[in-house]
Image (cartoon, rainbow, N blue to C red):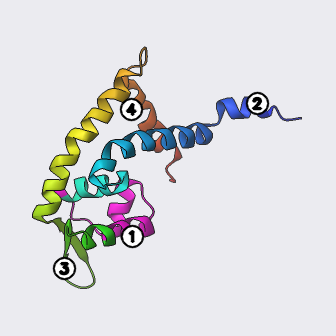
Amino acid sequence: MTDLEAIGRSCFALHARMTARLLSRSYEAALRPLGLTLPQFGILGAIGHGTTASETVLAERLGLERTTLVRNLKVLTQNGWIEPISEKGRGVRHRLTPEGQALLSAAIPLWQQAQSQLESKLQETDAEEARRAMRALRKAAYPS
């Protein structure tokens, strides 16, 4: 018989999903007063940073399904936080509106507070070491 308990203790996917859900809840709670979700914050940040990639590339960079990205871009546009900029052919990129820039500026301190609270709870685990481990797992899991 397979040792299911050992699988549960060692499975990277199981631990990643549990961790991702709990981390997302922490950041979502911090951003909730602004009516902003964590994926929307990431998208606004990428656009505000000057990412002009296609929607497919942007979704990959943010670790989102393309449909999730498109759905969030629609909401961000409807809320007046971003606006599309047509490109040659079918390409579209986006830029922050003044309202979107103000929202992102208001969201950053809330994100920083959530980040600091989580880092302070790591206790004996080095935050940068944890990030390195997560990057290594993403790299190991990325299809060749």
Q: SS class of the residue under badge 2?
A: helix
Inter-mark Cα distance, 3 to 2: 53 Å
State the extent of the magenta-drawn residues as a range: 48-73
In the rendered image, residue 51, in percent from the top left (x then y), is placed at 21, 59
Q: SS class of the residue under badge 1?
A: helix
- Residue 5 tag number: 2
User: How many residues crowd mark 1 within 10 Å: few (<14), some (14–19), many (20+)?
Assistant: few
Mark 2 or mark 4, whichever is nearer to me: 2
Q: Are marks 3 and 4 in contact (CB under 8 Å)?
A: no
Amino acid type at circle 2 is Glu
60 part of magenta stretch:
yes
Q: SS class of the residue under badge 4?
A: helix
- Residue 131 tag number: 4
Q: Examine the rendered structure and indicate whether residue 38 appears above or below residue 90.
A: above
Residue at 59%, 42% in the rendered image: 13
Inter-mark Cα distance, 1 to 4: 28 Å
Mark 1 or mark 4, whichever is nearer to me: 1
